[in-house]
Amino acid sequence: MRYLLFFAILVAAAPGLAAQDPRLEARLDPTTRAVVAALVDSARAEGLPTEPIVDKALEGTTKRASSDRIVAALRTLSTDLRLARGALGRTAPDGDVIAGASAIRAGASPETLERINGVRGKAGISVPLAVFADLVARGVPADTASTVILHLAEGGASDADYAGLERSVTRDIGAGAPPGASAAIRARVTTGDVGAATQGGPPPGVPVSPKDPKGKPSNRP
Amino acid sequence: MHDDDQHDELITRIADELRTPVALDPGFDARVMAQVRRSARARWRLALRWWTEPRPLRVSPLGGLACAAGVAALFVVGLVSLRPASPSPIHEAVTPGKVIAAEPGTEMVQFVLVAPQASTVSVVGDFNDWDPSRTPLQAEAAGGVWSVNVPLRSGQHQYAFVVNGKEWRPDPTAPRAVTDDFGSPNSVIVVGSKST
Amino acid sequence: MTDRSDPALIRQVLDGNPDAYGALVARYRERYSRFAVHMLGEREDAEEALQDAFLRAYRSLAQCADPARFDAWLFRILANRCRTAGARRARRARTFVRDEVALGEASAEHPAERREWREEIHRALGRLEPDQREAFLLKHVEDLSYEEMSTLTGAGISALKMRVKRACERLRVMLGEVQHA
């Protein structure tokens, strides 16, 4: 009798695990659904945002991808989310973690994320990451784009500065400039850092730009 | 705000009623674009004809030389003026206007696809669960210009069009996502938070 | 941010891609169809005027001085088209009855008929002077400032204010009665 009761409870609980999201239930086959649900559950347990994982699974079904391919993509995404969470901290909002994961996927390093987050503090990371995504989508190599957004952050650039840089680069590319070169040059122009090398920060001996971010509070715990 | 003495309830009611968008004939876009394309072709034909039609010219040898130099100069000037005008300052992703209000934190984005051969077009993306049945575009079926307005949260979004229920088509006017998990490329749109 | 702005689309068109103009047509057709329909009172006439405006704008796109303000430039072209079309139609047929006395008579002819609110508004609009109708629509429906209206129509701000005031007074008279009927 007790054995039957236990079994009944187990059966009742199982759908709760596998079908928490009705969208998955409607559009995935049972096997894939089970694996996806498990990935979603463990992400949730780690404090990672789960919506991007569900979204990626739905993208895969619309594109008629195989179950294996969907699961592989979700695993990659989970890893990126984990890295982003690690770089940005436990208290970082989900939106930032999601943007961070996209940036990592597009080629930014977790270290870059961490550095920008540390410098930007309360100003937040969403604008630099949005600009990063845009630059990379337009053909700026990922490492150049990373250097650019970090350079701006360390130079104390405002959100408007970031938007201005993105506009300038877009315009340059439209006029035929190589994306990477344009981004690098515009970054230097934005921070007033004319003598800086294309890669990395200002060479030794060049004074730090007037908008020194030292003293900005960090939101890291 | 209306600071004149006309601001009263009746006027407000009238204005509200008149503010309702007016549906146009579905063939409207197609008719305009057909004329636009005719116009574009006509311009080329005209330019071509000017260059290719023989014209009798009677000039002295010296005059002929001066003429040739002048024509060469004009040709150069013409080429220079054919290049696009220097672009004006670009403003951020623009909302389609005051027709529809978006919730705070979102922006109205218009998706457009020119697809004269399509019978259905929808947009799929991370804002609608990649569901082809959720967000159809509208246009004249025989015509060409399909569009829909969608409120999107700030940030990066990936999307693409699905034509006739099965053909995957990224947006020809938008950048491509650099990574592609499933063998069908997505387009990227980054919706900015408006600078206040 | 991905650039879907008017200047970007205009640049594509000028670079030799006329299809990009379709995005501009789709972007503005609804907002401006509304104005054209209310100005001219008939959808077919409005569509013709709007089509005409889009085509003219396309043909002179290179002369658009400020692509970031394409919307205002296009609107000005449309307002002109509507004025021309309205004048042409006034010569063709007496569609709009402007006389307030005639309005009273028309109401008496159909005392028992309850018209839709919208139809009444359109009739009332049709009875305004074109300048007043235009000013009323720009101010109260399209929500333009007087400065923007002045740039668009070429009229002075005080003249525009007077037109709006008169339009509102007349609309109140015509539609206030219907309200209480």
Image (cartoon, rainbow, N blue to C red):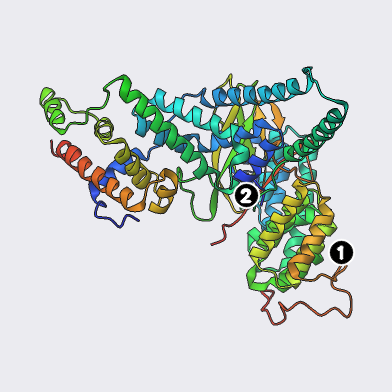
- At x 80%, y 71%, the residue is A193
Chain on which label 2 sits: A
Give the distance between the C-alpha atoms of the residues marked 1 and 2, in whole angstroms: 66 Å
Residue B135 shows up from this direction:
no
Q: Is residue C16 left or right of residue B92?
A: right
- At x 80%, y 20%, the residue is B58
Residue of label 1: A198
Q: Is residue B112 left or right of residue C101?
A: right
Which quadrant is the N terminus of chain B positioned in?
bottom left
Residues marked 1 and 2, same chain: yes
Secondary structure category for the residue under label 2: helix
Please tell me whether residue C169 is drawn above or below residue B138 in the rendered image.
below
Q: Is residue B48 left or right of residue A178?
A: left
The image quadrant of residue A207 is bottom right
Q: Amino acid at mark 2?
A: Phe
Residue A36 picture location, percent across and down: 71, 45
Residue B157 picture location, percent across and down: 66, 47
Residue C120 picture location, percent across and down: 24, 32
Residue C125 shows up from this direction:
yes
Please tell me whether residue C12 is drawn above or below residue A40 in the rendered image.
above
Residue of label 2: A6
Please tell me whether residue A220 is drawn above or below residue B48 in the rendered image.
below
